Amino acid sequence: MKTRLASLLQQAITSLQAQGELPEELTLDIQIEHTRDPSHGDYASNIAMMLAKPAKKNPRQIAQSIIEQLPSDNDVLEVNIAGPGFINFFINPLSQHAVIGHILQQGIRFGTSNIANGKKVQVEFVSANPTGPLHVGHGRGAAYGATVSNLLTAIGYQVHREYYVNDAGRQMDILATSVWLRYLESCGKTIEFPSNGYKGAYISDIASSLKKARGDAFNAKANDVFNNIPADEPAGGDKEKHIDALISRAKELLGHDHYRIVFDTALTSILGDIRLDLEDFGVHYDDWFSERSLMDNGAIERAIEKLKASGYMYQKDGAWWFKSTEFGDEKDRVVVRDNGLTTYFASDIAYHLHTLERGYDIIDIWGSDHHGYVPRVKAALQAMGADPERMKVLLVQFAVLYKGGEKMQMSTRSGQFVTLRELRKEIGSDAARYFYVMRKAEQHMDFDLDLATSQSNENPLFYVQYAHARVCSVMRLLTEKGLSYTEADGLNNLDKLTQSHETALIDTLNRYPEKLTQAAQNFEPHQLNHYLRELSTQFHSYYNSHKFIVDDAHLMQARLVLINATKQVLSNGLGLLGVNAPESM
RNA sequence: GCGCUCGUAGCUCAGCUGGAUAGAGUGUCGCCCUCCGAAGGCGAAGGUCGUGGGUUCGACUCCCGCCGAGCGCGCCA
């Protein structure tokens, strides 16, 4: 309907231009919006006010001229001027009713489109270091990324969901060493556990399963382990130097093969746990991309060569630097360290290049604490001749957890955090998925555990699910009464739906496709979330003021057709959010 | 100090990319079940949109200053 009205306006303006009433040269951006106030009609355009300046005329006068030139349309009942120069359109309610038939006919596909025309895009999200279980902070990125992926798919993108696994680097070495030290403890050794090691209970679990599977294969004497290791922080030393020395010692005492076994056992165990967690959370991936594979197959080396060839690399203090400042970054960045090892940045450059080369545009979903990282990656892509616009970073603020009114501090290292698994156990996947995308992603979010766990009506998810279940309940009752539902009959009697509750509900159903499109294009699941809330509100209100199962058979079928269409849209929307639409509660 | 993000009802947050009288939920206070599920509905109260300027027909929205919050500023990832 919007595009139809825009086209009508376009025609009117064109003929006014031909008559010399409006200047020939105009850059038109015809905006049609839904009115907020029903007394302003169904749709409104501000085009007359936008034309006021170039035409050097009073907006109301322009609006009058446009209306006079407007081609007639059977579904446009009335057009008038209001306020400073708005053009308000009143639409034939019967034309709005047609949406009900569309919804029932298209079913789960209603609202989807192909406006992206199959464009390939990769959404990379969560990608937490496999050094521990996912916590509630990761949960928001998971829910957001999965939902954004669903939304993009719904408007015709070919979406590739990917988890970038940081299975290389120092953090992983710290993990492996932490496991090994716990393993030594399980062998009866007395260990002073490093302050910078991973202290979670899951480390000991991995260590004891290693002990069970391999016996004493990795055993060592405590003296050999700690001999000549610089002091830890509590002992007045440097915790970083302490842990680095322990890593070297672990590699030395275990030898390459055994160290690798400890390392891979830890990695496999934790990553397996993460995968399971995400699956249970309804978050699915097309690929789990290994950082180490980039090293093994030479992709990092190739990327570095490409950067060097671009002329934006230089050597200083024994390291290779990338001149990211040339592209607006705050400072230049090290790509190859003076010890010859590549940085995480180098891996990331190779990873992004690799993705672009496979034909995907990139959507990275990162915690907002990584925002400073964006310019350098874009700079690298640009230096290598790629279009940085093909990479988009969506930042997600961490949710701050509250319990008993107290803010909960979280740290993976110390092992003190609420895991995603615990959260799901307490409030269920549906509530967690819904809660996480209730707010705009870059907005700080307070996640009140007491509220979410209260299972009460304070939880907005129940409200939406309840609307869906209520329709199902009505249909069950219909059957119990020995009555039947005849869709065709209902669709033939839509003109009986004239109550204000009914026209309002139909109007909201009409908005679903554009709402979905908008939510997808702006990467804003919360818009869909709010829409579903609004749709539910109108349904509940309708439910309370009118009975659906009435004596007038035609009216009853018309109403049943309307509430079934509502149920379909609720189900479609909840589905995109990764939430169940229950038949009963 | 510099950079990014953000300040909207008591609380948690929307505000359709510059439009008409700034909206929801929650909380508080009134009502509504002989009735398809009251996990519901109807109504009331609640605001200097952090603050001071600017841009224009028109600003919560765009620009600048200030105040306040979070994050970032490693040859860590």
Image (tube, rainbow, N blue to C red):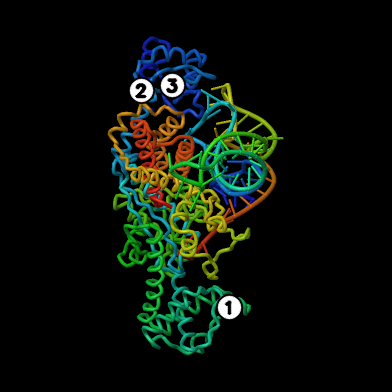
Query: Which chain does the numbered disc 2 sit on?
Result: A
Considering only vertical position in the picture, is B49 above or below A182?
Answer: above
Q: Residue visible at 45% across and 46% down?
A: A464
Q: Horizontal and vertical percent for residue A261?
A: 36, 78
Tag 1: amino acid:
Asp
- Give the residue pinned by disc 1: A232
From the top left corner, tell me how far across and down residue B77 is, in percent. Answer: 45, 64
Q: Nearer the viewer, residue A259 or A471?
A: A471
Q: Pick the quarter of the image with the N terminus of chain A.
A: top left
Look at discs 2 and 1 and give the one toward the viewer: 2
Q: Are marks 2 and 1 on the same chain?
A: yes
Q: Are marks 2 and 1 in contact (CB under 8 Å)?
A: no
Foreground: A283 or A547? A547
Few, some or many C-alpha atoms within 10 Å of disc 1 (few <14, some 14-19, many ≥20)? some
Q: N-terminal of the two: label 3 or label 2?
A: 2
Mark nearer the viewer, 3 or 1: 3
Q: Secondary structure at mark 2?
A: helix
First in sequence: mark 2 vs mark 1: 2
Mark linked to residue A7: 2
In the image, which is nearer the foreground, mark 3 or mark 2? 3
Q: Earlier in the sequence, mark 3 or mark 1?
A: 3
Q: In this image, A240 relative to A126: left or right? A: right
What chain does mark 3 sit on? A
Q: What amino acid does circle 3 point to? A: Phe
Residue type indicated by callout 2: Ser
Q: Which residue is mark 3?
A: A89
Q: Position of residue A66 (x, y in %)?
A: 42, 15
